[in-house]
Amino acid sequence: MSFGSPKESNFMEEHKSLVRRIEVFMPSRLGFHLRVIARFVKKVRQFRSVIRVRKGKITADGKNILGLLVLAVAWKSKIYIEAEGDDAMEAIESIGAFFRTEH
């Protein structure tokens, strides 16, 4: 019996999670405050992908309000957002649109 046949490896390659990333500068003068975070979490919870938000060395679950508050993202701060899953592309596009319209 042979393990790792081409069929098995092709199956694994086809089902790898998609990972997409975006860099965002906080557009809101009040920063990433509770109301903005609540709207953000409501938006990203529509997606199956895992969403991570990073500021500096701290990473938070993008679907967790308290985790995002801990990041203390101020106006014009740079954050990195990553989506991992089968709908990662749609999630990142939606997140990008969210920050373009959030003022």
Image: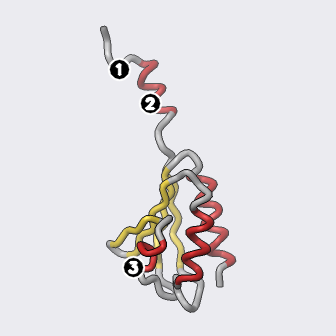
Q: Is residue 45 above or below residue 1?
A: below
Where residue 3 sits, quadrant-wise, is: top left
Q: Indicate whether 16 appears above or below 97.
A: above
Q: Crowdedness of circle 2 by 10 Å Cα count: few (<14), some, many (20+)?
A: few
User: 57 or 61, which is in the foreground?
Assistant: 61
Which amino acid is tagged 1?
Gly
Report how far apart the C-alphas of labels 1 and 2 lie in the structure: 10 Å
- Residue 12: x, y in percent? 44, 30
Quadrant occupied by the N terminus: top left
Q: Amino acid at mark 2?
A: Met
First in sequence: mark 1 vs mark 3: 1
**On the image, numbered disc 3 is attached to which residue?**
70
Give the percent coordinates (x, y) of residue 82.
48, 60
Q: Tell which residue pokes out farthest to the right in this image.
A: 101
- Quadrant housing the C terminus: bottom right
Using a 10 Å C-alpha cutoff, classify the residue at mark 3 as few (fewer than 14 neighbours), some (14 to 19) or many (20 or more).
few
* Element type where label 3 sits in the image: helix
Please tell me in which quadrant of the rendered image residue 42 appears: bottom right
Give the residue pinned by disc 2: 12
SS at badge 2: helix
Q: Which mark is residue 68?
A: none
Vertical placement of residue 8 versus 55, above or below? above
Residue count near mark 1 (Cα–Cα under 10 Å), binned few <14, some 14–19, many ≥20: few
Instruction: Tell me residue 7's x, y (percent).
Output: 46, 18
**Residue name at image x 56 percent, y 68 percent:** 41
**Closer to the N terminus: mark 1 or mark 2?**
1
- Per the image, the residue denoted by label 1 is 4
